[in-house]
């Protein structure tokens, strides 16, 4: 079987991308509020409440709440938890590595984004390296879309940016996004022989590398959601929703449209971004 989905891709018009930007900005606002609230002593449920309020007050709906029965607005994944950590009574502490994933729906269109941060000061330099290498891999993967090659170029760019310094989590990928949170095509985080569909204007995808300080192997806990590293190593997760347009890229879940990070990589910013 192909590693890339053969399902039909939902190609977006520029007008639809503008609608998606509203969901992207609301997702970004929720994550920024969570980042501001992230400190020792707060619970993961406290963070979930912050995001829920921002999304509600902004006229949106959470993408995650109720998705296949998921019970919260956010995924909050601490230390050895890679993704899909369910918010609850867990108290975050100084030095914890916390990944926060959020999605919002506005007018039927989805935004999806994630960041990883260290609470207070890092306990080990390796944790700060984990977070920064994974963040850099995200932007390398996004920048690869500007080459207008094949979707597999994203995974190759992510793998090259990681450079063997971390484990790249196996079995979890980015995805298409639009009128549903998860659509075709898959967006892999590593190099494969088959290069996938061609990148062309109208493609909207969520790029989301997940890396660990140890093995790429994971396990799912008894709640059927929480994904942890098999060896207990710490993990990081970064994600943005990105639109490919005629004249460049637009990172829909970045407040600046990705301008600063992409310009530093010599990537064109779509003129449509000026309308957002």
Image (spheres, rainbow, N blue to C red):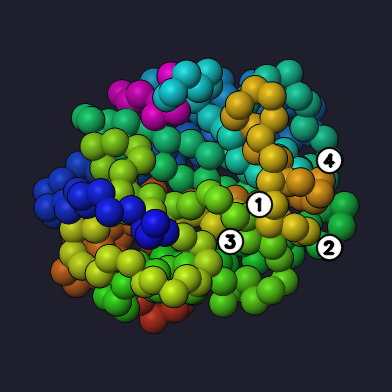
Q: Between 252 and 68, which is closer to the camera in this rendering?
A: 68
Of the image marks 2 and 1, the number of the one nearer the N terminus: 2
Going 39% across and 21% down the picture, which residue do you hit?
Answer: 56
At horizontal 43% and vertical 19% (from top left) the residue drawn is 66
In this view, the residue in front, 66 or 131, is 66
**What is the magenta range?**
58-66
- Check contact, mark 2 vs mark 1: CB within 8 A: no
* Mark 1 or mark 4: whose residue is earlier in sequence: 4
Q: Which mark is residue 236?
A: 1
Label 3: state its secondary structure: helix
Which residue lies under the disc numbered 2?
125
Label 2: which secondary element:
helix
Quadrant containing the N terminus in the rendered view: bottom left
**Residue occupied by mark 3:** 135
For marks 2 and 1, give the CA distance.
14 Å
Is residue 62 a member of the stretch shown in magenta? yes
Alpha carbon separation for disc pair 3 and 1: 9 Å
Q: Is mark 4 on a helix, strand or loop?
A: loop
Residue visible at 50% across and 22% down in the picture = 70
Direction from residue 240 to residue 245 in the image, left or right: left
**Is residue 274 visible from the viewing direction of this image?**
no
């Amino acid at each position: 079987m192909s590693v890339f989905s053969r399902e039909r891709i939902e190609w977006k018009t520029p007008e639809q991308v503008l609608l998606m930007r509203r969901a992207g900005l609301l997702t970004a606002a929720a994550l920024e509020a969570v980042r501001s609230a992230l400190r020792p002593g707060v619970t993961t449920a406290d963070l979930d409440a912050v995001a829920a309020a921002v999304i509600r007050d902004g006229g949106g709906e959470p993408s995650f709440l109720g998705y296949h029965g998921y019970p919260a607005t956010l995924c909050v994944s601490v230390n050895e938890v890679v993704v899909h950590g369910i918010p609850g009574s867990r108290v975050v502490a100084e030095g914890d590595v916390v990944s926060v994933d959020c999605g919002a729906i506005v007018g039927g269109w989805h935004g999806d984004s994630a960041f990883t941060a260290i609470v207070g000061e890092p306990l080990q330099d390796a944790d700060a390296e984990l977070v920064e290498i994974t963040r850099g891999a995200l932007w390398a993967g996004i920048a690869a879309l500007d080459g207008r090659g094949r979707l597999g170029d994203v995974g190759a760019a992510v793998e090259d940016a990681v450079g063997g310094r971390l484990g790249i989590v196996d079995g979890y990928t980015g995805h298409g996004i639009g009128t549903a949170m998860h659509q075709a095509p898959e967006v892999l985080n590593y190099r494969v022989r088959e290069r996938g569909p061609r990148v062309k204007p109208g493609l909207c995808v969520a790029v989301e590398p997940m890396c660990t300080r140890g093995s790429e192997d994971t396990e799912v806990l008894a709640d059927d959601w929480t994904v942890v590293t098999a060896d207990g190593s710490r993990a990081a997760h970064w994600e943005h929703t990105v639109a490919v347009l005629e004249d460049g890229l637009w990172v829909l879940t970045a407040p600046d449209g990705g301008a600063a990070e992409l310009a530093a990589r010599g990537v064109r910013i779509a003129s449509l971004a000026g309308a957002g």
